[in-house]
Amino acid sequence: MFERFTERARRVMQLATQEAQRLKHDHVGTEHLLLGLVKEGSGKGVGILQDIGIDPDALRTEIERRGHGPNTANPPANPRQTSRLLRVFDYANEESAAMSHNHIGTEHLLLGIMREPESCAARSLAALHCVPEMVRSRFAGPDGKPMTAADKLYERAMTDLTANLSAPVPTTDVLKAVAEALIKAGWRPQS
């Protein structure tokens, strides 16, 4: 599964391990994964949290408040991954597959966290009024189903067209036809 992780998701995993070590924990759990996601700071997962209005510092404080304190014994150099964290990885894999993605990115990790509601990470997000529906809505299409990569490309083309057209804006049907033609011709977002 880790071979499907994007470079950014792998970096989040490294940071999660560092966070567990910083907190002197003998395990890497969902709370460390979320701390790693926030610390990495540039992936889609943290972008979604920022869009929802989650303050990274407040989230860090909430996670550390909810988590347990440091171990009295010296923690191992390579902390074990918890079974809950492994379930989050499975959920992230399922989320990626449902979106027809061939990778697991930070956004899939965030969705995986949200599917483990009793985890420290999900409870910390809930304490800051971030619920699964808020995160999932960032991925759903107009029909409420998960958006595929093609759906997202189509939506981005429509947004770019609307933003770059002068008044009067053409009808939605005209925009859809132009967007389809552009995508078929090889158009891809600039950023």
Image (cartoon, rainbow, N blue to C red):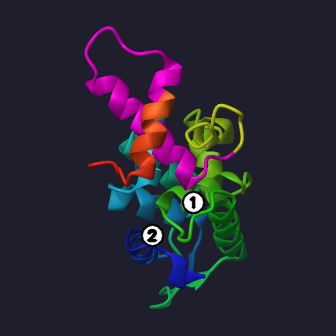
- In the displayed structure, does residue 167 sit left or right of residue 70? left
> In this rendering, does residue 189 appear at all?
yes
Please name the residue that numbered disc 1 is placed on.
108
Q: Does dot 2 land on a helix, a strand or a loop?
A: helix
- Tell me where residue 29 appears, x and y as whole percent: 59, 70
Quadrant in the picture for residue 30: bottom right
Q: Who is closer to the viewer here, 55 or 160? A: 160
- Tell me where residue 43 appears, x and y as whole percent: 38, 57
- In the displayed structure, does residue 7 sit left or right of residue 180? left
Q: Quadrant of the N terminus?
A: bottom right
Q: Which range of residues does the magenta coloring cover?
A: 146-175
Q: Who is closer to the viewer here, 37 or 32? A: 37
Q: Main secondary structure of the magenta part?
A: helix
Disc assigned to residue 9: 2
User: Against 47, is 41 above or below?
Assistant: below
User: Against 25, is 73 above or below?
Assistant: below
